[in-house]
Image (spheres, rainbow, N blue to C red):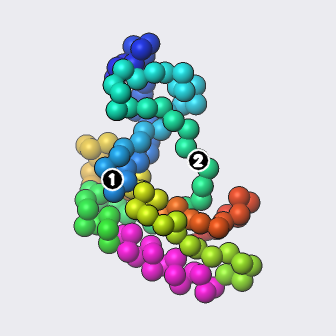
Amino acid sequence: FGKNEQNEKMEMTTPVFSNKNQKMQFVVEESSNSIKPVDGSVAVKDRERFLVAVASFSSIANKEITDETEKKLREAMKREESIHKDGVEFLPRRGDEFVELAQYNDPFTNPLQRRNEVLIALENIRDDFIALV
């Protein structure tokens, strides 16, 4: 909303990420790294590169639905571990900070048309590995 040293407004982008610690992250253009927020609780940071296991769902992303989706995703990850033969294991990183909710729609979008994803960061995955499960 222009609350930065340059008074520069930015368009809202998607997805909006949030974690269980109630931290929210907004995606901004790479050129935004030079923007300095006025509010000390806001920071512009690069995210580390990592791979995730993902489960999508529609509806309003409340705690109950998000927790149930995470549970189903973890169960699917355990099943997949036994299937892969080339040393790939779907091991989640430890800690709630590696579980995120990605929301792609504004609050005015019909709940049946909303796109949300639960993401679990993976451990021990090669950079060149891409899996579509």
Dots 1, 2 in contact, CB < 8 A: no
Indicate the quadrant where residue 126 lies. Answer: bottom right
Residue 125, visible in the rendered structure: yes
Indicate which disc, 1 or 2, sits on the residue closer to the N terminus.
1
Indicate the quadrant where residue 47 lies. Answer: top right
Q: Position of residue 96 (x, y in %)?
A: 40, 62
The residue depicted at 68 percent of the width and 75 percent of the height is: 88
The residue depicted at 58 percent of the width and 25 percent of the height is: 31
| Residue where numbered disc 2 is placed | 48
Look at the image and say whether residue 5 sits in the magenta stretch.
no
The mark found on residue 21 in the picture is 1
**Residue sitting nearer the eye, 94 or 28:** 94
Residue 113, visible in the rendered structure: no
Look at label 1 and name its amino acid.
Asn
Q: Position of residue 64 (x, y in %)?
A: 25, 67
Q: Position of residue 122 (x, y in %)?
A: 56, 65
Q: What SS does tag 2 mark?
A: loop
The crowd level at tag 2 (other Cα within 10 Å; few <14, some 14-19, many 20+) is few
The mark found on residue 69 in the picture is none
The crowd level at tag 1 (other Cα within 10 Å; few <14, some 14-19, many 20+) is few
From the image, which quarter does the C terminus lie in?
A: bottom right
Q: What SS does tag 1 mark?
A: loop
**Residue sitting nearer the eye, 105 or 81:** 81
What's the magenta region?
69-83
Look at the image and say whether residue 70 sits in the magenta stretch.
yes
From the image, which quarter does the N terminus lie in?
A: top left
Look at label 2 and name its amino acid.
Glu
Q: In this rendering, would 62 be left or right of 104?
A: left
The chief SS type of the magenta part is helix
The residue depicted at 72 percent of the width and 83 percent of the height is: 85
Q: Please determine whether, in this image, residue 89 is positioned above or below residue 117.
A: below
Q: Position of residue 41 (x, y in %)?
A: 34, 32
